[in-house]
Image (tube, grey):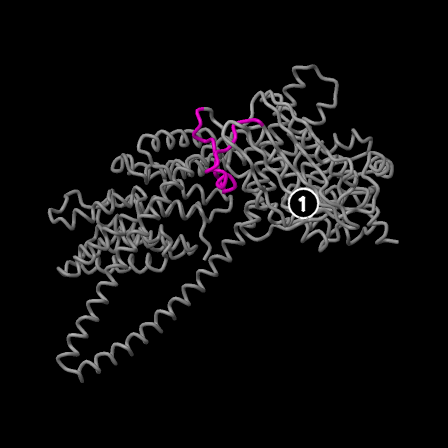
C-alpha cells in the first residue's frame, strides 16, 4: 500500500505522545516506571532505547504474569517498530495490546489502542478502516465522559477528511468542526504536548483551502511559537512544509522558497537524530540477538547433559529437535518470502512515486527560474544604467546558481534510480567553455578573482559527446574554485591528449590558489553532502553535492577525477574524456545565422498557461524578429490552429485540463503540417520517452541557450516537412 508523507507525520505525532494519555498516578513498581520512561523516549524519537527497555519489561511481565504491564509493553513496541519500518511487528504488537486491554477492561487504554490502530491503517492507505477505528475510539471516549481522551480521535477524524478531500469546501468545513473541537480540548489538557502543535499545523492548510488566508497565517505563527518553545522538530518541519505549499498555491514563490529552506534545515536536524536512533535500534537488536544465542547454547548444553543420563532418550530428543527446527525454518522462510514480496511491492511503488515527484518538482522549480534567467538576460541586452546592470547581473547569477543546485539534486536522483544516461550530441567545446565562464562572471567579480582559459587550438571545432553533463561538471568545478578562493586566480586548462580518425581524448584541469584541501580529507570531498570547510571560521555554505555529482557523471562517461592539493596552497582537479569527431567543420556563428535566416518568416504559436512564461518566450522571439502569438490553454490552441496558419507551436507540457501531449494528439487529428516543439521544464527522460508517441518534432528544456533554441525550431520544421512530403 502507498504511504503518504502526511500519514507518516500524523503517525509520528499521534503514536508518540501517548504518555499524556497514561493515568496521572505513577506506579511504584520499577517495571511500570521503566515502561513510562519508554513512552517518554518514544515521544522524543528515541526508538532504539524505547525498544530495548520495552523488550526487557515484556520479558518481566511474562515471568510475573502481569497482563496490564504486558499490554503497555506491546503498545510501546508497536509504536516504536512502526518508525523503524517494521510494519508487520507494529500491527502485531498493537492488536495484542488492544486485546489485553479489553481483557483487563481498561477503558482508558482501549481508547488509546483503537486510535493507534486507526493511525496504522491510515499509514497503509486504508482510510475506511482507519476512520472506523477512530470513530470507535471517539464513541468510547464520549461514552466514558472523558473529554481528555477525545482529543486524538477528534484530530484524526479531521485529518482523514483533509487527506481525501478533493478541493471541495464541504470536506474542509467538516474537518474544521472536528479540528476546532480537538483544539479547544488540547488547550485545556495538552498544554505542552506535540498534538497541540500538530492541530495548529493542519489548521494552516485547512483555513487556506477555505480561503481564509489571514487565519491560516495566524495558525502558522502559533505553530512556530509552540514548537520552538517545546522543541518538537517534526511538527515544526510540517508547519514550514504546509506554509510553503500555501504560498506556492498563491503564486508567492519567494515566500514558498523561504519556507522550504526552513523546512530543509529542520529536517536535517531530525535526520541527524533519526540516524542516531537507528544506531541505538541496531544496538537493541544486537542485545536481543545475544540473548537468543545464549538461550540456544543453554538448550544445547541441557540436551548434552540429558544424553549422558539416557542415550536413547537423547537420540529421540535430537531427532525431535531436528524435525522441529526444519519445520520452524520452513515456516520462517515462508514468512520471509512473504515479507520480501511485500517489501518489493512497496519499493516499486515508492520508486514510481519518487519518479513522479522529481518530474513534478523539476517542472515547478525550473518554470519560475526560466522567467528569472531569460528576462534578466534579455534586459541586460537593452540600454540600461550601470546600477540596474549590476542588479540584473546579480539576479541572473543567482538564477543560474539555483539552477545548478537544482540540476545537482535531480542528477543525484537519476544516479540513485539508475536512470543516468549518456546523451550524445554535436557541440563546439570552446564555445561551451566560454559560455560557462561568462555565466560565472558576477561570482568572479564578487570574490575579486580572475580567471584564465588556456584552450588547445588543435582540438577539433566540433565534438560528439554529452555536452550537458560536461557543462555541469565544469560549472561545479569552476564554481567550487571560486567559492573557496578570494582575491585570487583560477586557471582552466583544456588540452588535446591524442587524436585518431574517429576519436579525440581531451585533458581538463581546473586549478585555484585558494584554501586548498588537507591530504587526509581529499578522499572525502567526493562523498555526498560532505563539506570540507563547513566548520571554518568563515561560512562556506552549500549542499556538499557538487563534487559528488562531478565524480558520478565522469564515472558514467567512463572517466574519473583526481585532485592535487595542500592546505592554504590551492587545489587542482583534473580528468580526461574521450569524444567522437563530427564531420561538420564547425558550429560557428555562420551556421547559427543560417538557421535563424530559415525561420525568420515563421509565424509561431506559444501555448502556455503561465502568463510570465508567455511574456519571456515572446520577448526571446521578438529579439529574433520572429512573429508570435500566445494562448493560455490546449483547448484555445486547438481552436486557433483551425482558423489561422502557424509554422510551429512551442508547447508547454504541464497544463491543467488538456496537457501538452493531449493537445498535440488532438492537433494531429486534423493538421499534419505544423511542427510541434515541447518547451518544457520537466525532466529530460519523461519528455524523450513521450514526444515520439504523440507525434511531436522535438523539445527545448527551459531555460535554454538561444543558439539551441533556434536550431531546434529549424530542425523540427525540416523534420515535419520530410514527414508530410
What is the secondary structure assignment of the residue under circle 1?
Answer: strand
Q: Is residue 535 magenta?
A: yes
Which residue is outermost to the bottom? Answer: 312
**Badge 1 density bin: few <14, some 14–19, many ≥20, Cα 10 Å:** some
Query: For this view, does 45 lie left or right of residue 31?
Result: right
Give the image location of residue 146, x and y in percent.
Answer: 22, 45
Out of 317 and 697, give the one closest to the viewer. 317
Q: Across the whole image, how many numbered discs are drawn on residues?
A: 1
Out of 439 and 206, give the one closest to the viewer. 439
325 over 5 or under it: above or below:
below
Out of 264 and 607, give the one closest to the viewer. 264
Give the image location of residue 441, x and y in percent.
Answer: 65, 25
Q: Which residue is rendered at x = 37% and y = 44% of the image? A: 274
Q: Which residue is rendered at x = 28% and y = 76% of the image? A: 324
Query: For this view, does 17 lie left or right of residue 129?
Result: left
Q: Quadrant of the C terminus?
A: bottom right
Give the image location of residue 149, x and y in percent.
Answer: 25, 45
Which residue is outermost to the right? Answer: 725
Please indicate, yes or no, whether residue 119 appears anywhere in the rendered image: no
Give the image location of residue 500, x and y in percent.
Answer: 77, 49
Q: Is residue 155 magenta?
A: no
Q: Quadrant of the N terminus?
A: bottom left
**Magenta portion: prevailing SS class:** loop
The range drawn in magenta is 513-537
Please indicate, yes or no, whether residue 275 appears anywhere in the rendered image: yes
Residue 93 found in image quarter: bottom left
- Residue position for label 1: 577
Residue 613 found in image quarter: top right
Amino acid at each position: 500500500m502507498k504511504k503518504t508523507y502526511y500519514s507518516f507525520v500524523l503517525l509520528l505525532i499521534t503514536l508518540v505522545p501517548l504518555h499524556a494519555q497514561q493515568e496521572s498516578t505513577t506506579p511504584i513498581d520499577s517495571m511500570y516506571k521503566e515502561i513510562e520512561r519508554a513512552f517518554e523516549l518514544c515521544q522524543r524519537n528515541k526508538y532504539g532505547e524505547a525498544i530495548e527497555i520495552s523488550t526487557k519489561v515484556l520479558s518481566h511481565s511474562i515471568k510475573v504474569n502481569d497482563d496490564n504491564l504486558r499490554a503497555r509493553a506491546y503498545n510501546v513496541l508497536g509504536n516504536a517498530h512502526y518508525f523503524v519500518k517494521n510494519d508487520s511487528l507494529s500491527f502485531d504488537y498493537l492488536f495484542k495490546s488492544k486485546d489485553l486491554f479489553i481483557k483487563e477492561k481498561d477503558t482508558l487504554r482501549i481508547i488509546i489502542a483503537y486510535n493507534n490502530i486507526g493511525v496504522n491503517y491510515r499509514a497503509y492507505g486504508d482510510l475506511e478502516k482507519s476512520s472506523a477505528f477512530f470513530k470507535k475510539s471517539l464513541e468510547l471516549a464520549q461514552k466514558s465522559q472523558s473529554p481528555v481522551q477525545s482529543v486524538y480521535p477528534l484530530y484524526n477524524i479531521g485529518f482523514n477528511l483533509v487527506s481525501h478531500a478533493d478541493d471541495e469546501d464541504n470536506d474542509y468545513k467538516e474537518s474544521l468542526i472536528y479540528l476546532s473541537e480537538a483544539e479547544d480540548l488540547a488547550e485545556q489538557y495538552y498544554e505542552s504536548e506535540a498534538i497541540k502543535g500538530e492541530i495548529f499545523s493542519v489548521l494552516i492548510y485547512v483555513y487556506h483551502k477555505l480561503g481564509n488566508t489571514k487565519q491560516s497565517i495566524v495558525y502558522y505563527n502559533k505553530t512556530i511559537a509552540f514548537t520552538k518553545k517545546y522543541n518538537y522538530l517534526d511538527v515544526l518541519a510540517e508547519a514550514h512544509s504546509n506554509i510553503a505549499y500555501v504560498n506556492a498555491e498563491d503564486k508567492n514563490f519567494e515566500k514558498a522558497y523561504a519556507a522550504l529552506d526552513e523546512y530543509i534545515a529542520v529536517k536535517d536536524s531530525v535526520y541527524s537524530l533519526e540516524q542516531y536512533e537507528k544506531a541505538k535500534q541496531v544496538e537493541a537488536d544486537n542485545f536481543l540477538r545475544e540473548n537468543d544465542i545464549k538461550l540456544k547454547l543453554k538448550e544445547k548444553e541441557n540436551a548434552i547433559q540429558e544424553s549422558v543420563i539416557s542415550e536413547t532418550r537423547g537420540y529421540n530428543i535430537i531427532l525431535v529437535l531436528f524435525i522441529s527446527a526444519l519445520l520452524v525454518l520452513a515456516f520462517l522462510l515462508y514468512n520471509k518470502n512473504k515479507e520480501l514480496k511485500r517489501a518489493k511491492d512497496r519499493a516499486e511503488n515508492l520508486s514510481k512515486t519518487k519518479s513522479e515527484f522529481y518530474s513534478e518538482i523539476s517542472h515547478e522549480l525550473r518554470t519560475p527560474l526560466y522567467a528569472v534567467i531569460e528576462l534578466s538576460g534579455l534586459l541586460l541586452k537593452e540600454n540600461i544604467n550601470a546600477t540596474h546592470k549590476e542588479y540584473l547581473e546579480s539576479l541572473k547569477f543567482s538564477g543560474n546558481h539555483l539552477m545548478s543546485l537544482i540540476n545537482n539534486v535531480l542528477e543525484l536522483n537519476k544516479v540513485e534510480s539508475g536512470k543516468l544516461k549518456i546523451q550524445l550530441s554535436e557541440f563546439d567545446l570552446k564555445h561551451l567553455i566560454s559560455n560557462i565562464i561568462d555565466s560565472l562572471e558576477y561570482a568572479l567579480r564578487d570574490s575579486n578573482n580572475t580567471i584564465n582559459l588556456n584552450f588547445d587550438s588543435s582540438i577539433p571545432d566540433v565534438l560528439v559527446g554529452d555536452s550537458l553533463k560536461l557543462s555541469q561538471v565544469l560549472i561545479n568545478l569552476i564554481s567550487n574554485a571560486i567559492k573557496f578562493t578570494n582575491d585570487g586566480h583560477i586557471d582552466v586548462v583544456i588540452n588535446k591528449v591524442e587524436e585518431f580518425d574517429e576519436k579525440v581524448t581531451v585533458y581538463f584541469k581546473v586549478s585555484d590558489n585558494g584554501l586548498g584541501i588537507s591530504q587526509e580529507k581529499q578522499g572525502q570531498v567526493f562523498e555526498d553532502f560532505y563539506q570540507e570547510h563547513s566548520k571554518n571560521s568563515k561560512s562556506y555554505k552549500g549542499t556538499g553535492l557538487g563534487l559528488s555529482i562531478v565524480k558520478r557523471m565522469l564515472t558514467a562517461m567512463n572517466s574519473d577525477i583526481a585532485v592535487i592539493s595542500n592546505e592554504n596552497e590551492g587545489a587542482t582537479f583534473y580528468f580526461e574524456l574521450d569524444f567522437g569527431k563530427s564531420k561538420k567543420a564547425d558550429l560557428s556563428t555562420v551556421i547559427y545565422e543560417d538557421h535563424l535566416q530559415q525561420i525568420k518568416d515563421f509565424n509561431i504559436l506559444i501555448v502556455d498557461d503561465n502568463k510570465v512564461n508567455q511574456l519571456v518566450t515572446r520577448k526571446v522571439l521578438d529579439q529574433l524578429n520572429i512573429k508570435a502569438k500566445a494562448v493560455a490553454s490546449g483547448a484555445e490552441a486547438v481552436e486557433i490552429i483551425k482558423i489561422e496558419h502557424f509554422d510551429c507551436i512551442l508547447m508547454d507540457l504541464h497544463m491543467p485540463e488538456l496537457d501538452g501531449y493531449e493537445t498535440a494528439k488532438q492537433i494531429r487529428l486534423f493538421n499534419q503540417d505544423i511542427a510541434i516543439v515541447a518547451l518544457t521544464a520537466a525532466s529530460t527522460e519523461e519528455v524523450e520517452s513521450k514526444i515520439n508517441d504523440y507525434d511531436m518534432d522535438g523539445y527545448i528544456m527551459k531555460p535554454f541557450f538561444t543558439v539551441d533554441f533556434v536550431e531546434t525550431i529549424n530542425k523540427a520544421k525540416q523534420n515535419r516537412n520530410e514527414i508530410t512530403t
